[in-house]
Amino acid sequence: MPCGTSGSAAIAGAGLSPARYNCVLKSNLVAMRSLRRLLLALVTLKFLPPSWRVAGFLAAGGVAGLGAFVFHVSRAASYLSDDPETCVNCHVMGPQYLTWQHSSHARQANCNDCHVPHDGWLRHYAFKARDGLWHATVFTLRWEPQVIHLSRAARDVVESNCRRCHGEVVSEVSARQHATGDLRCWDCHREVPHGRVRSLSATPGVFRPELPAVIQPKQEPTIGGRPVRPDKKGS
C-alpha cells in the first residue's frame, strides 16, 4: 500500500504508526539502493562499453591528477584561511598589503575582517567565493587598473564592518545615522588603513610576501627569506 494512502498513517503521539514507519523505511531503503547502484556505475564506468573503460579510467585519472595539481599550484586551501598574505598569492594587492602592514589595523584586523560580510557564514563564504573568482579573472586577463577601488557591493560591506567594529565609538560621536548615499567612514578617515598612495607602482615589491616553489610541501610565505610574522613561527 502506498505511503500516502494508508489510513493508519496518522501520527501517534510523538512518532509514526508502525504501518507508516515501515512504509517510510522501505522507501528509504529503495532510495539508498538506487543511489548505491548509481555510484557503483560511476566508479566502475559501467555506463561505458567494455572496450572504452580502460581509456575512461585513464582519462578520469588524468583529470583528477590535473585537478589536484591546479589545487596545489593555486594554493586553493589557503583561501579558506584569514591570513592577509593569501590576498597577495596572485592578486595585485602589494600596495594594499604593505600599507595595511604598517598601519594600526595590522595589529587588530585582517583583510577578511573588513572586506567580507560577517552576518552569516553562508553569505560570508558566498561573497568571498564570488569576489575571489572575479579577482582571479581580472588578474589573469590583466584588467586591473593602476589604482584599485572598491566595487559597489564591497563599499557596503566595508562600511558595515567599520560600524560593526567601531560601534561603540560611532554611537557616542554620531548624532544621527547617515542616510543612504551620505558620507562614508573613509570620506573623513582617508588615511585608514591604506593611506593615500595606492597605485600599483607606489610601493617596493621587495617587501611583498613571497611563496616558495610549488614542489615544496610547506607553503608558508616569507618576506626576504624571513617569516612574515616571527611570533607565529612556533604556532
Image (cartoon, rainbow, N blue to C red):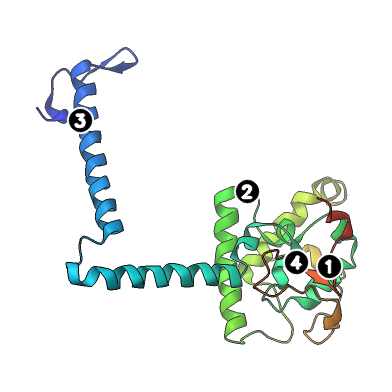
For the point 12% across and 27% down, which residue is it?
Answer: 5
Coordinates of residue 79 in the picture (x, y in percent): 63, 62
Spatial CA distance of label 2 from label 1 is 24 Å
- Three-letter amino acid code at the position of disc 3: Lys
Side of 206 where 29 appears, left or right: left
Total labels: the figure holds 4
Q: Is residue 173 above or below residue 30?
A: below
Q: Secondary structure at mark 3?
A: helix
The image's mark for residue 119 is 2
Residue occupied by mark 1:
100
**Circle nearer the N terminus (4, 3):** 3
Side of 138 where 13 appears, left or right: left
**Circle nearer the N terminus (2, 1):** 1
**Callout 1: few (<14), some (14-19), or many (20+) C-alpha neighbours within 10 Å?**
many
Residue 63, quarter of the rendered image: bottom left
Q: Is residue 139 above or below residue 79?
A: below
Residue occupied by mark 4:
85
Q: Is residue 35 above or below residue 75?
A: above
In the rendered structure, are the residues bearing label 2 and label 1 in contact, judged by CB atoms less than 8 Å apart? no
Spatial CA distance of label 4 from label 1 is 11 Å
Q: Nearer the viewer, mark 4 or mark 1?
A: 4
In the rendered structure, are the residues bearing label 3 and label 1 in contact, judged by CB atoms less than 8 Å apart? no
Return the residue found at the far left: 1
Which of the two residues, 44 or 90, is positioned nearer the viewer here?
Answer: 44
**Circle nearer the N terminus (3, 1):** 3
- Three-letter amino acid code at the position of disc 1: Trp
Residue occupied by mark 3:
26
